[in-house]
Amino acid sequence: MPDVTQTATIPPVKHLPDAQTVTDVKHWTDRLFSFRVTRPQSLRFRSGEFVMIGLMGENGKPLLRAYSIASPAWDEELEFYSIKVPDGPLTSKLQHIGVGDEIILRPKPVGTLVLDALLPGKRVWFLATGTGIAPFASLMREPETYEKFEEVVMMHTCRTVAELEYGRALVESLKDDPLIGELVGDKLKYYPTATREEFHHRGRITDNLMSGKVFEDLGIAPMDAGHDRAMVCGSLAFNKDVMAVLEHYGLHEGANSEPREYVVEKAFVGDGI
């Protein structure tokens, strides 16, 4: 008599380790996309932090990279914003994910782009290029940002106008956000620039800060170490250039353990992902 229990056994479905399910994907350009995934119930993070996410590599081992969480700490899901690198070990695969797919998410958030790492001030600058806007997408939707600062300036620079769309759409949605719309009010000033196409704002962040053009265009006072604070996220070269500008204005780099006038995220050092 055949062993019915053995023949009726269905092998368990194999899931990725630390798996989370993709709930939404949006492709902004042929180089940029964002996606949302389920949030582990145990995950607690501060807006601006990052986690390690990824997929299984060809060798059967997890292939992970650091990604800033673009959603705020209060969101029930997690959002990420990514570049697509054709030959990138991870993004060459990650860009093809769809709703219902799984990704690996290690629920151990870290990072320096948190409000606690800044000394109290009146105005905070978010300075980013490309996908470096991700942690600020989190912080712009964080109520504490507007409770701690009277003014928030989001400077975002990309090569083309199309690459600015993710940030533009997010900023535009804030005024009608039922949770933080009133908090944001007119506190948030958005200054997007393109470097390779005609646009109403042109040029690099460093040039617009050093020339004073951004102060003139926004009708605000020049940067002053007494009340200005800043956060920086971009390529290694961009970070170094912006740090030099901030130091020129008298700001000093801080950290979680020693809050100062500005902080820099150093976990992202290149686009070969």
Image: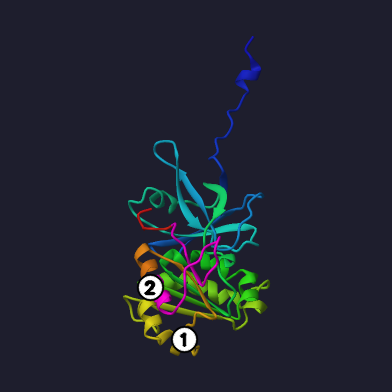
Disc 1 marks which amino acid? Pro
Residue 222 numbered tag:
1
Q: Against 10, is 196 above or below?
A: below
Residue lying at 52% horizontally and 70% vertically, measured from the top left: 260
Seen from this angle, which residue lies furthest top?
Answer: 1
The image position of residue 223, as x and y in percent, is 47, 83
Identify residue for label 2.
244
Query: Dot 1: within a 10 Å radius of its alpha carbon, few (fewer than 14), some, or many (20 or more) residues?
Result: some
The answer to whether 141 appears left or right of 164 in the picture is: right
Q: Earlier in the sequence, mark 1 or mark 2?
A: 1
Q: Against 43, is 32 above or below?
A: below
Q: Which SS does the magenta portion mostly show?
A: loop
Helix, strand or loop under label 1? loop
Helix, strand or loop under label 2? helix
Query: How is this picture coloured?
Result: rainbow
Q: Which residues are magenta?
A: 243-267
Asked if residue 262 lies in the magenta stretch, the reply is yes
Query: Dot 2: within a 10 Å radius of its alpha carbon, few (fewer than 14), some, or many (20 or more) residues?
Result: some
Q: Against 176, is 104 above or below?
A: above
Q: Against 99, is 115 above or below?
A: below
**Is any part of residue 25 visible from this angle?**
no
Q: Nearer the viewer, residue 64 or 226?
A: 226
The image position of residue 137, as x and y in percent, is 53, 67
Q: Nearer the viewer, residue 273 or 150?
A: 150
The image position of residue 120, as x and y in percent, is 60, 74
Residue lying at 55% horizontally and 77% vertically, measured from the top left: 172
Residue lying at 54% horizontally and 75% vertically, measured from the top left: 171
Disc 2 marks which amino acid? Ala
The image position of residue 144, as x and y in percent, is 64, 70
